[in-house]
Structures are given as C-alpha cells and as structure tokens.
Image (spheres, helix red, strand yellow):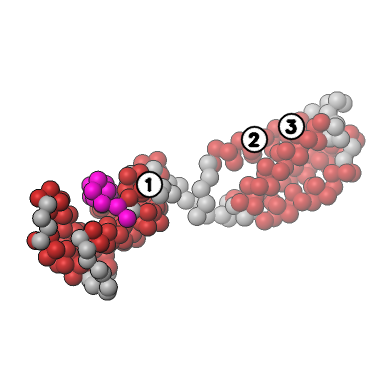
Amino acid sequence: MLKFCAKDFVVLMSELEGLIKALSADDPDFSVLGNNWDRITDILERTSQWCKLIELNASQELIDHIYFLRDEWTIKSLNEAKENIKTLLSVIRTELGKQLFLFVQNADAQWFERKDGFGKAVSDAFNSALKDIKEAGNCYATGHYNASIFHSMRVLECGLNVLAKELGITIKRESWGGVIGLIEKAIENEPNRERKEFFSGAALEFRFFKDAWRNHISHNRRDYDKFQALSVLNHVGAFMGHLATKIKE
C-alpha cells in the first residue's frame, strides 16, 4: 500500500492547468525554447513521478511523447504544446477515475506505518516485535480488525517469550497456556519480592489476554469490530509498556 498526500497531487494538476493558460496567452515573450522550457520540464518531471507512483501508464506514455516532440516546439507552435498538455491533463483525469484509492480518517491514520505505535520504550525493549507492532497499526487503520488483533497477539507473544527467558525457562513448542504455566511455577521460587510481584502480575495479564482474545483470534472463533480492535491495541500497548520497565530482549 502506498502512502501519499493528495494535496500534492492537486497542486500539481493546478500547475498543469496554469501551464495551459500560459501557453494560450499570445505572449510574444513566452518561448518554450528558453527558460520557460525549464518550467515545463519541471512540471512534467514531477507529473511523471506521480504517474509512475500510482500507475497511470497511459499518462506516463503521453509525457514521454511530449518529451520526444519538444525539440519541434517553437514560438509558432505553442498551440501544439498547449494541446499536448491539455490532452495529458484529460488522460490523467480519466485514469484517476479507474484507480482505487483508500481514505484513512485522521483518527485512524495515526496508527499507519508506525513501528513505535506502542511507544518508543516498547520498540526499544522488544525489537523483534517491531514488524508486528507496525502491522497491528496498519491493519487497524485500514479496517482489518481481526488482523490487527492477530498481530497484537504476536507482539504479546514476544513479551511472553522474553518473560519466560528472564525466569530461566527454555521454550520449545509449548502453547501459551503451557508457557504461562511454566512461568507461574518458576515465580514460586523467585526470592526477590519485588520481582515476584511484577512477574505474578504479568503472568495474570497474559492469562487474561489468552482467554479474552488470543485463543479466539487464533482459532477463528469470532470476528471483531473497530472499537474492540482499538481496545486491544490500547491494552496491549499499555501492558507491553509496563513490561518494558523491567525486562527487554
């Protein structure tokens, strides 16, 4: 998925329209062979970049054609230049009507493409979770709420594995329930009171996440809506931030 600001494209279309007006202005000082060709080139090059980005192939071919003809443009053939650019603008509009664009509301866009969506402390402490943190936010922003929760659970799994390692537990192929059980057993032998309280609370939270969301999303038991997905993002982010105060990879 591509991310770009529509405003930039609107401004560029306005520049093309302005160029058409300039070429229609019967101004004897307006020559495409002098500095004005630099202006035309700049606008066409930026237009070309946009056309390539959003796959407006016919428009891109027309720009190439305009470049091919540019050596033939003189003060006497400004009308031809104008018509070429008018045609380009028309073709761009036609192609835009055939493309699919998605709009992300501002409140949701804050989650898009953010590897630190759960906070910098979480990203720094659990580097292996960066991809899933970003994907959890991307899926939420684009309306894929089940997928957002799935990636959030993968972020939690990173935290679960780090917690187990902190307690000297070697994980092989155990389920969440099995790992949590091993963690709870290891906590019983933790001599440090502060660490024991922290680990006990963390284990309890993992059981909650497992029963409330992880098992359901992993086994396709139900679907989730936007508000539930946002709740999961907030809960997971807060909990991982709490873990990051004491443990890290």
Q: Which residue is mark 1?
A: 116
Residue type indicated by callout 1:
Asp
| Mark 3 in CB contact with mark 1 (< 8 angstroms) | no
Image vertical order of residue 40 relative to residue 97, above or below: above
Q: Residue at x 80, y 32 (%)?
A: 36
Q: Which mark is residue 9?
A: none
Residue type indicated by callout 2:
Ser
Q: Nearer the viewer, mark 2 or mark 3?
A: 2
Residue 110 image point, x, y percent: 39, 43
Q: Is residue 224 left or right of residue 113?
A: left
- The residue closer to the viewer here, 158 or 11, is 158
Report the magenta residues as a range.
Answer: 236-249
Q: Residue at x 53, y 45 (%)?
A: 4
Residue 26 image point, x, y percent: 83, 28
Q: Residue at x 33, y 53 (%)?
A: 126
Q: Nearer the viewer, mark 3 or mark 1?
A: 1
* Secondary structure of residue under mark 1: loop
| Mark 2 in CB contact with mark 3 (< 8 angstroms) | no
Q: Which residue is mark 2?
A: 14
* Secondary structure of residue under mark 3: helix
> Was residue 53 drawn as part of the magenta stretch in this picture?
no
Q: CA distance from mark 1 to mark 2?
A: 36 Å
Q: Is residue 161 left or right of residue 23?
A: left
Q: Which residue is mark 3?
A: 21
Is residue 170 something that shows in the picture? yes
Residue 87 image point, x, y percent: 73, 46
- The residue closer to the viewer here, 38 or 235, is 235
